């Protein structure tokens, strides 16, 4: 089975796509506006599936997966335009969670420890 794409692969793939157009990346502020728009679309879909607001019969069916993909694409565009390595950004955040927030949540007990 083929191995999945790394974050670096995703960033390269998006950059290759965007680089074929003269316009290039939108400005960071425009991309933040797009993120907000896409997040709103995701929220709407989640509300339709899990909330109290069913879709109107005139609304097209969109999947949560598609909306998450749209968000990911814009996040990658924003990172690329600012020369941010998302793997490094992820590692930074995980280090923060594993140090500063390590005792913030109730951990699931290890099954081996439970049997003692």
Image (cartoon, rainbow, N blue to C red):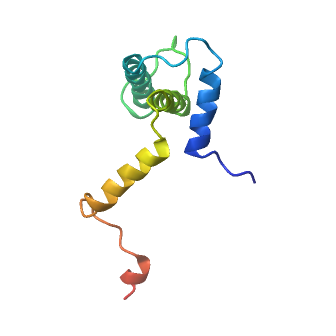
Q: Where is residue 11 in the image (x, y as percent from the top left)?
A: 56, 36
**Measuring 62% from the left and 21% from the top, which residue is drawn there?**
19
Image quarter where the N terminus lies is: bottom right
Residue 40 placement, left or right of 81:
left
Most foreground residue, 65 or 86: 86
Residue 17 placement, left or right of 106:
right
Q: Position of residue 25 (x, y in %)?
A: 51, 19
| 44 to 83, vertically: above or below | above
**Measuring 47% from the left and 29% from the top, which residue is drawn there?**
71
Most foreground residue, 30 or 61: 30
Q: How many marks?
A: 0
Image quarter where the C terminus lies is: bottom left
Most foreground residue, 50 or 37: 37
Q: Where is residue 99 in the image (x, y as percent from the top left)?
A: 29, 61
Q: What is the residue that sits farthest to the bottom in this orientation?
A: 116
Q: Where is residue 48 in the image (x, y as percent from the top left)?
A: 44, 27
């Amino acid at each position: 089975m083929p191995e999945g794409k790394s974050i670096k692969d995703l960033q390269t793939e998006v950059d290759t796509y965007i680089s074929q157009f003269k316009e290039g990346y939108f400005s960071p502020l425009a991309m933040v506006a797009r993120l907000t728009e896409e997040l709103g679309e995701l929220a709407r879909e989640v509300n339709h599936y899990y909330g109290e607001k069913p879709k109107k019969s005139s609304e097209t069916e969109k999947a949560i997966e598609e909306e998450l993909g749209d968000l990911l694409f814009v996040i990658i565009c924003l990172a690329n335009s600012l020369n941010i390595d998302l793997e490094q950004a992820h590692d930074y955040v995980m280090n923060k969670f594993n140090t500063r927030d390590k005792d913030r949540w109730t951990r699931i007990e290890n099954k081996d420890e439970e049997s003692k």
